[in-house]
Amino acid sequence: MKRSMIKETLEKVGEVVVLKGWVNSIREHGKVVFIDLRDRTGMVQVVFWGEVAVAAKALGVEYVVEIEGLVKQRSGSNVNAEIETGSVEIEGQKLTVINESKTPPFEINKDTSAVDEAVRLKYRYLDLRSARVQKNIKLRSEFVRRVREFLFGQDFTEIETPLLTKSTPEGSRDFVVPSRLQPGKFYALPQSPQQYKQLLMTAGFEKYFQTARAIRDEDLRADRGFEHTQIDLEMSFVERDDVMNLVEEMMITVAEEMGYQIKEKPFPRITYKESMAKYGADKFDLRTEEEVKNGVLAFAWVVEFPFFEKTDDGKWTFSHNPFSMPISEHLDDLMEGKNIGEIKTTQYDLICNGYEAGGGSIRAHKAEILEATYKVMGYSAEETRESVGHMLEAFQLGTPPHGGIALGVERMIMNLANEKYLREVQAFPMTGSGQTSVMEAPSELSEKQLKELSLKSVM
Ligand code: ASP
């Protein structure tokens, strides 16, 4: 007999069905055994008595089973309002154990957020079975699917960019990968696809996106890991408002389709200066307590950031993105290296419920503008060429004006799911000390591997 999904049992009253899934819980009442059976669509109560109840008594939680049984309507006070299938139950007739399970190291049929982090992540596949984490991961999938659909509807092309690449400045440290074929040389994992997406504009795609992995060696925080995913997009022949309007329409469409309420439309726009004066920060939460409770989303844009900021050793560095264009009124100052502290960038940050949900800008598309930016940062012409010579070259081969944005998927899902920690919305997150889930990394390399890579560990 074909497997039915648990959710479908609601429409199959009076029929005999075959269900497959996990034993969520077991209760014995004398000769009668009740189990809650779980599959990806939900949970249903199965009742066993008679001979098959003897076999059911031998089950343990998280056993994988196949159950054949009759779907029965529950009446009156027997209806369980707690679960979606609470108006039915299954009279178990046949029971097959597909696989046993040892007693799990923590209870999966309860909220796992209080379980020790190291244990949760060591057994992440069990943690992922719990209802809340399942829901978060599915929410993430739905969000990304809807974003994709929206962007395809706007004629974007989805394009992947390399993971083994050259260091690109996003203001963080690189993760590096040693090259076996070129001893002593290293690839860097991308802090973002920034340069490739700009090169795709040179390549004439005009509208690009990908759900890109960005890998940055930063100090870990509740809302920040080494790896995150961003909805990365770039468009040609656009100005700042074109990108902001498209992103705004996308976020509104996707959030509302998913049943969320948005506090203010269009999203309020405020300058960095106003934001600092009003909130003392460049991100802020506009929701009332009531709105926090009701899961309302409060978006806002922050614009007109200073292009440059001072480093500890008194030099200038970019505040967000060295590839940005300054606002048009300040282009001359950049080109002449004047009033550096006053130059504003075309950067726009999207804020949602107090988090930075994303950021982007209109980019320099002419070599001399990027050269001027690097000059402000103290690079010689030679050093600039070494760092971004390939971009300077592309900009001299017909690069259209362009701009884009990257939106952090995890932070958005944290907002949608009302979670405070990144690990609640990533399938296989790291611990706060950078240890991977389930598998043990970082780990040592064998002597043979080190030799192949021409590396010597000095630890
Ligand atoms: N590359 C930037 C980042 O990853 C985003 C952008 O400017 O598009 O933060």
Image (spheres, rainbow, N blue to C red):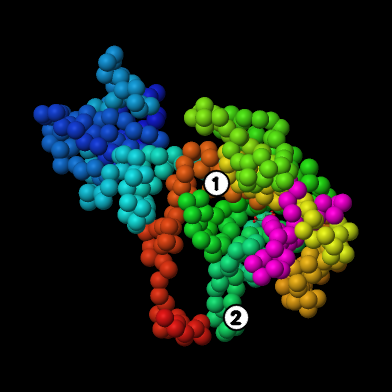
Mark yes or no: residue 129 visible. Answer: no
Indicate whether residue 319 is drawn in magenta: yes
Q: Identify the secondary structure beneath mark 1.
A: helix
Q: Mark 1 points at which residue?
A: 411
Residue occupying the far top of the picture = 76
Which kind of residue does numbered mark 1 sit on? Arg
Which kind of residue does numbered mark 2 sit on? Lys
Marks 1/2: CA–CA distance: 34 Å
To which quarter of the image does residue 245 belong?
top right
Residue 209, horizontal then vertical, whole percent? 68, 51
Front-most of 173 and 182?
173
To which quarter of the image does residue 302 belong?
top right
Whether residue 140 is situated above or below residue 320 in the rendered picture: above
Q: Quarter containing ligand 1?
A: bottom right
Residue 256, horizontal then vertical, whole percent? 60, 31
| CB contact under 8 Å: marks 1 and 2 | no
> What span is colored magenta in the figure?
302-330
Mark yes or no: residue 39 visible. Answer: yes
Q: Is 61 left or right of 111, judged from the image as shown?
A: left
Q: Residues within 10 Å of mark 1 (few under 14, many from 20)?
A: many
Q: Chief secondary structure of the magenta span?
A: loop
To which quarter of the image does residue 374 belong?
bottom right
Residue occupying the far left of the picture = 30
Indicate whether residue 63 is drawn in magenta: no
Q: Mark 2 points at which residue?
A: 185
- Report the disc number at residue 208: none
Q: Residues within 10 Å of mark 2 (few under 14, many from 20)?
A: few
Q: Is 437 left or right of 141, judged from the image as shown?
A: left
